[in-house]
Amino acid sequence: MAFCACEPTVGQFRSYLPAPVASTSQTVVLTNRIDPAWLRAPTNLFTLGPGDRIEIESMTDTNATTAVVGPDGKIYFGLLPGLDVWGLTLGQTQAQLEQGMAKYVREPPEISVLLREVESKRVWVLGYVQKPGVFALTQPMTLLEAISLAGGPLSLSTYRQEEATGAGDSLADLRRSFVLRDGQMLPVDFERLLEQGDLSENIFLEPGDFVYFPPATAKVVYVLGAVNQPRAVPYRAGMTVAAAVASAYGTITGAYLPHVAVLRGSLTNPQITIVDYKRVIRGEARDIALQPRDIVYVPFSPYRYLTKYVQLVLDTFVSSAAINAGTAWIGVPGGGAGVFIPVGVGSTGVPIVTPPPIH
């Protein structure tokens, strides 16, 4: 057998060397911090909206009348035609009723209006709390007050009791808990608020705010963006970005593969890794391993500013989590049947499906 004493070429070396990892990682400090205005109690008075129930009583009639604000914002009382009260305070509603009734009676009418039930202004507190639900917002309410109404996050003692009775894992993940407002995540640090007592994180809530406490023991990876089935896929030891994307039925046409993002860590201080997925699937670069609760986001276009890209991924994640949690809660006995889940335009629930096999 003859041996060649010549030097190997670069191409020969390349065939034996492992492919480089086509990714870069860094921790991103989000610049959108708590707005000081969120820490001040709203000064505007309660205004009526569809679904609110009021009690109307005339001083000339001892019998009180209950009226419900209809979907069109109107109420009906006595001889009056539909009276539009949407956006009016109780005092303004009273004045409108007295002005309208003055056309039908000789003496100036005296009418009182009391608020009996609120349906138009509510906040959601769902996930791993003692009493998840939707709570009426009749007066200024802080985040801590809303969490208190929901019984607080499931404690370790409660977790152990449920585990003993076979109820399963129940601890809340404060690093991934969030407040969603108008389709955007507010930069509230739940660890600082609940574990360190930092009241600078205790914002006042607004109607439609969605507060969610995910499970700390979830063994899933979230695959979002330009994939065929955005969803949470079961995590398996050694799972890579390619395997996770395959479990979401692959990417769609037009996805921008060189800028696939992997977010890890807390929502307020995430670490992002940009993966050139195009090189990975071509075999030109090694894939990277994932961890439970990582977020994999396949973009529709290249990013220009990293912080804005991170915020896009976070907003997509929390909107998806909220719509799925809200949909699941509405479907349980005693849940909020018939209520609207306020998570922003373009958010959709994703059904759990069986992923295709990975070869």
Image (cartoon, rainbow, N blue to C red):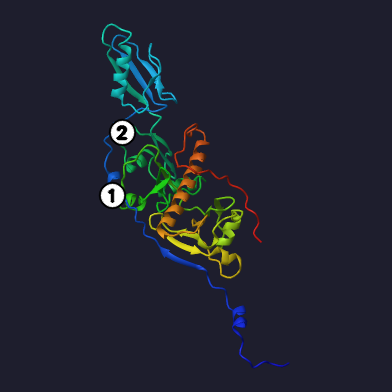
Circle 1 sits in a helix, a strand or a loop, which is it? helix
Q: How many marks?
A: 2
Q: Earlier in the sequence, mark 2 or mark 1?
A: 2
Picture residue at 36% right of the left edge, 42% below the top: 147
Q: Position of residue 110 (x, y in %)?
A: 27, 13
Callout 2: few (<14), some (14-19), or many (20+) C-alpha neighbours within 10 Å? Answer: few
Could you say where residue 76 lies in the image, as x and y percent from the top left?
A: 40, 17
Q: Residue at x 61, y 54 (%)?
A: 249
In this view of the protein, which residue sits in the foreground, 170 or 202?
Answer: 202
Question: Could you say whether the residue bearing mark 2 is in a helix, strand or loop?
Answer: loop
Image vertical order of residue 299 relative to residue 18, above or below: above
Q: Is residue 154 visible?
A: no
Amino acid under disc 2: Gln
Residue 26 in the image, given as x and y percentages of width and height = 42, 65
Going 39% across and 26% down the picture, which residue do you hit?
Answer: 52
Q: Which residue is mark 1?
A: 200
Query: Mark 2 highlights which residue?
Result: 139
